[in-house]
Image (cartoon, rainbow, N blue to C red):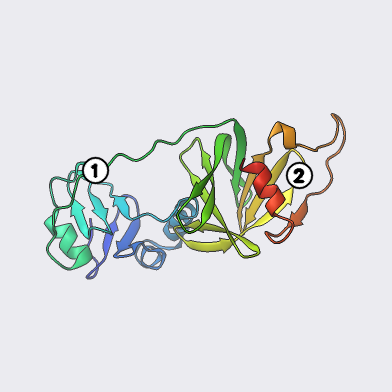
Amino acid sequence: MDFPQPGVICDSTYQICLDQQGPSLPLTRQFFGPAAANRLLAQLSSRPPQRDFMLSGGQLCDLNQRNCWDDGWRRRAVSVPLSRQLFGAGPVPGPMPMPGPQASQGNRSCQLSQRGMPVFNGACRLYRQNDGYAQSYLVEMGSGQVFRYQRRGNLLVLNDATGTWPVFLFDRGNSVQFRRAYLLLDVSRPMQARGGPADGATLPSPTPRSSGEAAPDLIDGLFQ
């Protein structure tokens, strides 16, 4: 690990720099260059916001507990140098974490592409999650990637580690596309909800739908 400046840890193996907010695109670009920053952006754009991070040497840092450990998820051996470098104070031992849920596969098919390049093609699971104040629509793929969508008034947005982004929907008959900038997620529709053409017919060009008045029927039909 490198400590280029107070409050910053750079992992030369992963070519990622972190500060007290987690992985930092500006710092990664500064110390490892634009290519490393683009790789980090691609990683963060398919994940919900994280509060703990594993480094290449097996160390774990938790932003909520403001602590780092040398033994990773066991969280028994506090790393005093890493904790002081990242958080600027002596570490306080934290509780053992509960194991998180494992990614599961459902009966849908998802295709994910980034800048026109295929990233994932396989089984996925769609479900709803109530966060207490808002309902989220989650797409969980067999690779472990999770996309979390929410309605914000007349908008559908994607929340991930890079921020909150507007999403546009494309109804393709047998599938629905979620498009956010250079990320395109194509999700198969339930068999009973498909309205595509007969075999051998040509699909019409996809019609873009923003997440306004016309989108709830698409979302509710997918996330049943």
Query: Are there few (<14), some (14-19), or many (20+) residues within 10 Å of tag 2?
Result: many
Residue 107, quarter of the rendered image: top right
171, 112: nearer the viewer? 171
121, 130: nearer the viewer? 130
User: Is disc 1 placed on a helix, strand or loop?
Assistant: helix
Number of labels in the image equals 2
Q: Whole-percent x and y of residue 159?
A: 50, 58
Lower position in the chain sequence, tag 2 or tag 1: 1
The reply to whether dot 2 and dot 1 touch (C-beta < 8 Å) is no
Residue for badge 2: 172
User: Is disc 2 placed on a helix, strand or loop?
Assistant: loop
Furthest residue in direction bottom, as rendered: 6
Residue for badge 1: 73
Q: Whole-percent x and y of residue 136?
A: 53, 52
Furthest residue in direction front, as rendered: 132
Q: CA distance from mark 2 to mark 1?
A: 43 Å
174 lies above or below 159: above
Q: Which residue sits at x=18%, y=43%?
A: 71
Picture disc at residue 130: none
